[in-house]
Image (cartoon, rainbow, N blue to C red):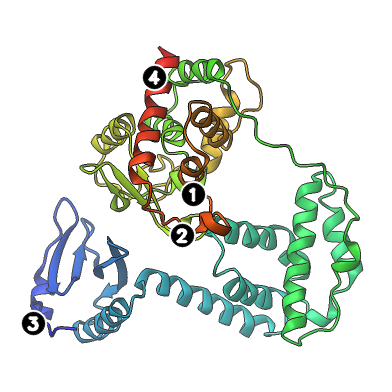
Amino acid sequence: MRPLNYSLSPTRINNAKPKSSTYKLSDGGGLFVEISPGGQKSWRYQYRYAGKRQTVSIGRYPEIGVADARDRHFELRALVAKGGDPAEAKRKEADERKLLASAVQMGSDAFEPFSRRWINERMESKSATYRNQMLSLLERFVWPEIGSLKLREVRPAQVLRIVEAKRATPRTAEDVRKVIQKVFDFAIQKLEVETNPASPLRGMIEVPRAVHHRHLSEPELAAFWKTLDKQGAHPVTIGAAKMLFYTMLRKCEVLKAKWTEIDLENATWDVPSVRLKMKRPHRVYLSRQAVEVLTMLRAIDHRKEYVFPSVLRPGTSVAEATLNHLFNRMDFGVPDFSPHGTRSTTATILREHGFSRDVVELLLAHVERGAAASYHHHELAHERRRALQYLADQIDRIAA
């Protein structure tokens, strides 16, 4: 790393007065002090990771002094130089602090701190959505019942009571049983226990067979498209619904989009691997219609971090439930059409109009096995861009 000539002094920071909007005092090398309209002063570090600009908080001033902030800045710069992401490292540190605090309070061999350890060690490679689902199941249904018990104290009867309480929703009941089983499988591998109290309960709850997401025919898609703008929903929610079709991405992948991922000038959107089910980055070649939607959203408020910001919860993205509610209340002649059905709808349209399976699978960000696995996510770029533009034009045609 090249040496830096830092520019800030305590006197300059102390004398900096708040303004009507947030502003920065740069110290050098991406390190700066952010001053809010309320007068709060915070150290932040701006860096580039995976080709995108990112920002991570270091702490408040004067609690974190100039020398301490620069020491931390050096550590973060070194992490970036080695290919690491400071924001991800900070998240892990926070998780470890929670785990340590929980372990100190309950004892490290209690179920809750050990299951937090399981999440940190075994869920690291999973998507954020899946990781949060597991955490939610534990927080809502498991920890209140057995979280404070030592692992060796948990009996099948206690697991049965937790599962039986959710019998009215069999899929949730089985998910709860599975997450307990996974934690104890991990505990057996770590030699903490010898038996798994959730295993004997396998099959106790009969889970209905999964229903595949229905896709729309072209006439049904036309009806959906005409109905969409008449719902009176917020423009951000409408834009998110349209982008599901224009990008062929999953709901969580669209809603968590950040402006740092999108290049409107070159009509590309690079979705990071951490948000994708298959754990590899994916490039979307934006159609003219998709760029129009994004340009409209950018004009609404370009200062937001998220492309689809929540109106009710500042600093977060639109919740997945918001899109679910929009789709549920739409009356266009097809009941039970869900956001996930947009992927099978768009894939079917492209296949029926002559686009190859290889192109469609790449657009869906599927990871192929065998010979197809040799494709890189930037390959077939021309065909993928042409396919997504054709798809958007076809939607215009059938809705006209």
The one of 372 and 296 positioned closer to us in this rendering: 372
Image: 85 above or below 268 = below
CA separation in Å, label 3 and label 1: 44 Å
Residue at image mark 1: 365
Q: Earlier in the sequence, mark 1 or mark 2?
A: 2
The one of 63 and 70 positioned closer to us in this rendering: 70
In the image, which is nearer the foreground, mark 3 or mark 1?
1
Query: In the drawing, what numbered circle is on residue 396?
Result: 4
Q: Earlier in the sequence, mark 2 or mark 4?
A: 2
Query: In the drawing, what numbered circle is on residue 5?
Result: 3
Badge 1 vs badge 2, beta-carbon distance below 8 Å: yes
In the picture provided, is 146 more to the left or to the right than 383?
right
> Could you say whether the residue bearing mark 3 is in a helix, strand or loop?
loop
Q: Quadrant of the N terminus?
A: bottom left
In the picture provided, is 353 more to the left or to the right than 43?
right
Badge 3 vs badge 4, beta-carbon distance below 8 Å: no
CA separation in Å, label 3 and label 4: 55 Å
Q: Residue 201 location in percent, x, y?
A: 89, 62
Q: Residues within 10 Å of mark 2 (few under 14, many from 20)?
A: some
Q: Residue 265 location in percent, x, y?
A: 20, 42
Q: Residue 46 location in percent, x, y?
A: 24, 67
Q: What's under tag 4, amino acid-wise? A: Asp
- The residue positioned 69% from the left and 63% from the top of the image is 138
CA separation in Å, label 4 and label 1: 24 Å
In the image, which is nearer the foreground, mark 2 or mark 3?
2
Q: Earlier in the sequence, mark 3 or mark 4?
A: 3
Q: What's under tag 2, amino acid-wise? A: Arg
Q: What's under tag 3, amino acid-wise? A: Asn
Q: Earlier in the sequence, mark 4 or mark 1?
A: 1
